[in-house]
Amino acid sequence: MSIPDVVDIIKNVDKELVDRESVMERPGDVGDALGTRKAHEPFDPRLCARMPVDRYAADYNMKHKRRGLALIFNHENFDVPQLKMRAGTNVDCENLTATLKGLDFDVHVYKDLKLRDLQKEIERASQMDHSDADCILITILSHGELGYLYAKDCQYKLDVIWSYFTANHCPSLAGKPKLFFIQACQGDQLDGGMLLSPKDRTETDSSSSMTFKIPTHADFLIAYSTIPGFYSWRNTQKGSWFMQSLCQELNSHGRKYDILTLLTFVAQRVAYDFESNTPDIPMMHQQKQIPCITTMLTRLLRFEEKKAF
């Protein structure tokens, strides 16, 4: 059976079946991307941002007055006919909101925004003064396909969002972490996994204070729920595999480990603890998933305990 045939089956699957099984973050076949951001002015070398930490410091400065903004764009329903409702996304949103508040973020949730409204919120955030904040965190819960995400009304590229926060466009976040978590498909490929057999039991077991320039795209981290080209799975009652694992790891070890160590263990949870459960659709049954992390961080990031000012 071909992938298109299976997609047709999934589109017509009975609602009760969908509600009790894990489902994919299904993309739809929509036309060209809309709402692409206009080009910005070239970087002005005369612009200068304040250094938030010593030049060769091993860790980001997480001792500002505020942790920073956390924006969650939660997409459940869509105007695009091919896109199904994302049952279970509100569970992700609620769990992530509680988790981020527990790490001292100022959390703002936006539901089912059209691209123009989504961009307005992003632009508003980028124009704020983040001088007294440690970082910024943005999460998108939506449908997606390779290279694109979906707002309520159309598709767009992620750079429409993160480009607002490069150092030359948002100087008060220059040198600070800019974190993006993306729960969405990146394609229609499936990962059937590989069975591992038990291990053989017989086997042995001074210039730091000087002004310096940084790349405008430094200090970003983008964590995708799945690798390019592949499905991302979501349980309609418990939420997506990636968000379940991210919240569990942040709740358990969010103040103990640096963010890349945390995300390694998030990947471990997704890879080892989950498997799709769609026995009525054999080709989709017992499938696996692995998150994908793109990092331009230049220091270690730890969510240290906030002290009262």
Image (cartoon, grey):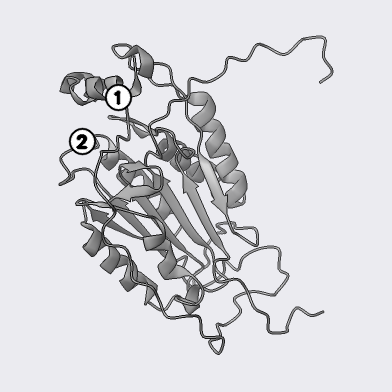
Mark 2 highlights which residue? 84
Q: Residue at x 19, y 52 (%)?
A: 153
Res 125 → quadrant: bottom left
The N terminus - image quarter = top left
Furthest residue in direction bottom, as rendered: 46
**Residue 309 visible somewhere in the drawing:** no
Q: Residue at x 72, y 13 (%)?
A: 199
Instruction: Identify which amino acid the numbered label 2 is placed on.
Output: Lys
Mark 2 nearby-residue class (10 Å; few <14, some 14–19, many ≥20): some
Q: Residue 123 in the image: x percent, y percent? A: 33, 71
Mark 1 highlights which residue? 4
Is residue 67 shown above or below 210?
above
Is residue 169 shown above or below 199?
below
Label whose residue precedes the other's in the sequence (2 or 1)? 1
Instruction: Identify which amino acid the numbered label 1 is placed on.
Output: Pro
Is residue 81 shown above or below 37?
above
Q: Residue 129 in the image: x percent, y percent? A: 41, 79
Q: Residue at x 68, y 84 (%)?
A: 211
Q: Is residue 278 left or right of residue 53?
A: left
Q: How many marks?
A: 2
Kindly state the secondary structure of the residue where label 2 is placed. loop
Q: Residue 231 in the image: x percent, y percent? A: 40, 32
Kindly state the secondary structure of the residue where label 1 is placed. helix
Q: Residue at x 40, y 57 (%)?
A: 138
Is residue 228 shown above or below 275?
below
Q: Nearer the viewer, mark 2 or mark 1?
A: 1
Q: Is residue 304 left or right of residue 207?
A: left
Q: Is residue 15 left or right of residue 137?
A: left
**Residue 308 visible somewhere in the drawing:** yes
Q: Residue 61 in the image: x percent, y percent? A: 60, 68
